[in-house]
Image (cartoon, rainbow, N blue to C red):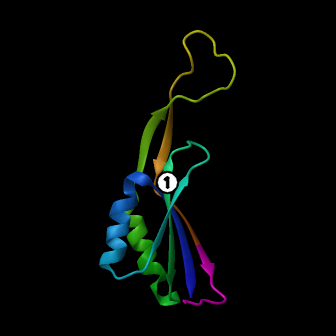
Amino acid sequence: MKLIIAVVQDRDSNRLSQALVRENIPVTKLASTGGFLRAGNTTFLIGVGDDQVEKVLDIIRENSQVRKEFITPHMGGDTQEGGSCPVEVRIGGATVFVLAVERFEHF
């Protein structure tokens, strides 16, 4: 058994959740916040058999899009006149961890 932890941008959360449910894959969703952009994320906890890992990864891949956006970095302290220049960053997609589960119990 494996535990898949997938962190996705909130914009992709509902689409991914619906795709997992359609495939009868049990999932737990947790609200989370990214440290770099301080933007909303959703963390999915997905427990599956070893034989289902690739199927779940494909679903995550298909439903988590990478985008480019411009952000204005907060430099802390006083900024010079005119402020900071926007910077293009990649956001979205998914960060996924696949962990071996030594023991699983459901009460």
Residue visible at 52% across and 28% down in the picture: 72
x, y percentage for residue 51? 48, 89
**Quadrant including the N terminus:** bottom right
Q: Nearer the viewer, residue 106 or 91?
A: 106
Residue visible at 33% across and 80% down in the picture: 23
Q: Amino acid at mark 1?
A: Asn
Is the magenta region chiefly helix, strand or loop?
Answer: loop
45 part of magenta stretch: no
x, y percentage for residue 34? 57, 49
| Residue furthest right as drawn | 77
The relative height of residue 48 versus residue 19 in the rendered view (above or below) is below
Q: In the image, which residues are magenta?
A: 98-107
- The quarter of the picture where residue 3 lies is bottom right
Give the labeled residue for mark 1: 41
- The quarter of the picture where residue 15 lies is bottom left
Residue visible at 67% across and 88% down in the picture: 102
x, y percentage for residue 75? 65, 26
The relative height of residue 16 versus residue 46 in the rendered view (above or below) is above
**Quadrant including the C terminus:** bottom right
